[in-house]
């Protein structure tokens, strides 16, 4: 599963606007570039600064790229950014090949860092930056965010080849054409215990006019017809979300929208879903997580389970494919509560569902809770969590927790009516065999 490096493209466009800087993106993902090819790419750019963005499961790659860059030229400034350095700052900064880490939202911090490097001013006190001072890691907390998101330039789409992403699976696993990911908001006001805080907890939004202008620019200049909205919470401001849908429908552009992330399922209504469908929405994810009110309260998500169940049914009635996210293995979760979540999924009108085993990532409230329980927090270098299972935070044996998950997936999928509905409603028939293959592997082989 691959998506365009949207964060890097935003940084690139912001830096371009605020200075005479030559910015390039080495996009390793779509070309399956090998690390052996990277030195030539770096030498051809002759950069003064290299920025590497990484999620936690990409952490080994982050450090490998930093070592390659330092080996080419010890004078290159190497800066890390993204979700992983934000959460695992001190661990990342133990790597002497990394000079700085940009924490959280990067535009203002990276711009200030570049100005400091250009003028020779000290960088150690820059807001939202981790650095070293006399060998010690110094972190300045993020205090400022971009308030007016409309003031940001659109991402620097010209720095990557959008067409190369057509053949790869995207988050929604829908679509085969030229597509682009889209961010219309930043920040989320909810305090879910398992969630990151990269963009802060204050909801900030772009105007509907600004969002439509970006879609139109991609549509007319780059031939994009498919859009994946990856906000943390697109529908926090429900009237704004409806207006965006209405403006798209009125624009005459023939596009498809998918929401693999960022729609809070109990903040929808009939009008929202009807407008979403008219605007071209074909796919929507619903993050239920747990069907136990006690755990909903403990996790501070507080989803209204009756509302989200109703809205799943309404979305399906409107012709939108529905995927459900569920998390199994929360602290203190019992067999009965695990079963209640599985029962909710099985009874629902969802076309598809994933059941993840909970992992406590650094930088979340769940990690703090894990420590109080004497449970290990996921190490940034432990990439095996993708395949081996979990940090078991329940009182159940590991084997039993994983067995309950596997049986839950089998119960969900081994229903002829569900398979028939998926085949009938899946918005991308040519990718259906690959999707079914993924589901089969998850049921039979994944922990």
Image: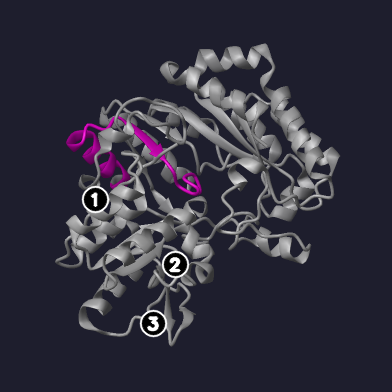
Query: Reading the chain from its start, which is encountered first: label 2 or label 1?
Result: 2
- Circle 1 — which element? loop
Residue at 34% across, 45% down = 34
Residue 156: x percent and y percent? Answer: 24, 50
Image vertical order of residue 276 relative to residue 5, above or below: above
Q: Give the labeled residue for mark 2.
A: 103
Residue at 35% across, 28% down = 167
User: Quick check: 398 left or right of 132?
Assistant: right
Residue 186 counted in the magenta span: no
Image vertical order of residue 258 relative to residue 148, above or below: above
What is the crowding at mark 1: few (fewer than 14 residues within 10 Å), some, or many (at least 20)?
some
Alpha carbons under labels 1 and 3: distance apart: 28 Å
Say which of 32 and 301 sits in front: 32
Q: Residue 239 lies in what quarter of the image?
A: top left
What is the crowding at mark 3: few (fewer than 14 residues within 10 Å), some, or many (at least 20)?
some
Query: Reading the chain from its start, which is encountered first: label 3 or label 2?
Result: 2
Q: Give the labeled residue for mark 1.
A: 156
- Circle 3 — which element? loop
Alpha carbons under labels 2 and 1: distance apart: 21 Å
Q: Residue 443 lies in what quarter of the image?
A: top right
- Circle 2 — which element? loop
Q: In the displayed image of the protein, which residue is found farthest to the left?
A: 20
Q: Give the labeled residue for mark 3.
A: 124
Residue 262: x percent and y percent? Answer: 50, 44
């Amino acid at each position: 599963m691959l998506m365009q490096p949207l964060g890097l493209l935003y940084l690139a466009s912001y830096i371009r606007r605020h200075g005479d800087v030559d910015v390039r993106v080495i996009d390793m993902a779509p070309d399956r570039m090998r690390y052996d090819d990277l030195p030539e790419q770096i030498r051809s750019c002759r950069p003064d600064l290299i920025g590497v963005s990484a999620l936690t499961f990409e952490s080994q790659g982050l450090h490998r790229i930093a070592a390659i860059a330092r080996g080419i030229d010890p004078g290159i400034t190497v800066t890390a950014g993204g979700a992983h350095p934000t959460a695992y700052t001190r661990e990342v900064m133990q790597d002497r090949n990394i000079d700085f880490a940009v924490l959280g939202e990067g535009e203002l911090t990276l711009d200030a860092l570049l100005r400091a490097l250009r003028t020779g001013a000290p960088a150690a006190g820059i807001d939202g930056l981790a650095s070293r001072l006399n060998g010690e890691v110094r972190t300045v907390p993020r205090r400022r965010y971009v308030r007016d998101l409309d003031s940001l330039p659109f991402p620097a789409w010209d720095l990557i080849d959008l067409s190369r992403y057509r053949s790869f699976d995207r988050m929604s696993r829908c679509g085969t054409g030229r597509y682009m990911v889209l961010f219309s908001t930043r920040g989320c006001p909810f305090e879910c215990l398992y969630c990151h805080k990269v963009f802060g907890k204050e909801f900030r939004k772009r105007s509907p006019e600004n969002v439509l202008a970006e879609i139109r620019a991609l549509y007319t200049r780059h031939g994009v017809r498919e859009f994946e909205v990856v906000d943390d919470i697109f529908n926090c401001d429900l009237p704004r979300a409806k207006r965006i849908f209405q403006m798209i429908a009125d624009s005459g552009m023939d596009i498809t929208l998918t929401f693999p992330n960022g729609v809070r399922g109990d903040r929808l209504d009939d009008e929202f879903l009807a407008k979403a469908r008219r605007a071209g929405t074909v796919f929507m994810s619903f993050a239920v997580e747990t069907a136990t009110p006690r755990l909903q309260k403990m996790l501070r998500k507080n989803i209204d389970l009756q509302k989200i169940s109703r809205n799943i049914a309404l979305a399906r009635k409107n012709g939108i494919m529905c995927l459900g996210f569920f998390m199994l293995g929360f602290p203190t979760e019992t067999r009965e509560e695990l079963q209640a979540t599985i029962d909710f999924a099985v009874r629902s009108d969802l076309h598809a569902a994933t059941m993840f085993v909970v992992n406590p990532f650094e930088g979340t409230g769940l990690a703090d809770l894990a420590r109080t329980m004497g449970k290990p927090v996921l190490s940034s270098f432990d990439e095996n969590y993708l395949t081996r299972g979990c940090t078991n935070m329940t009182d159940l044996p590991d084997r039993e927790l994983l067995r309950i998950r596997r049986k839950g997936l089998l119960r969900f999928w081994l229903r002829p009516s569900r398979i028939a509905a998926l085949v009938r409603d899946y918005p991308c028939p040519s990718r259906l065999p690959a999707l079914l293959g993924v589901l089969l592997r998850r049921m039979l082989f994944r922990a």
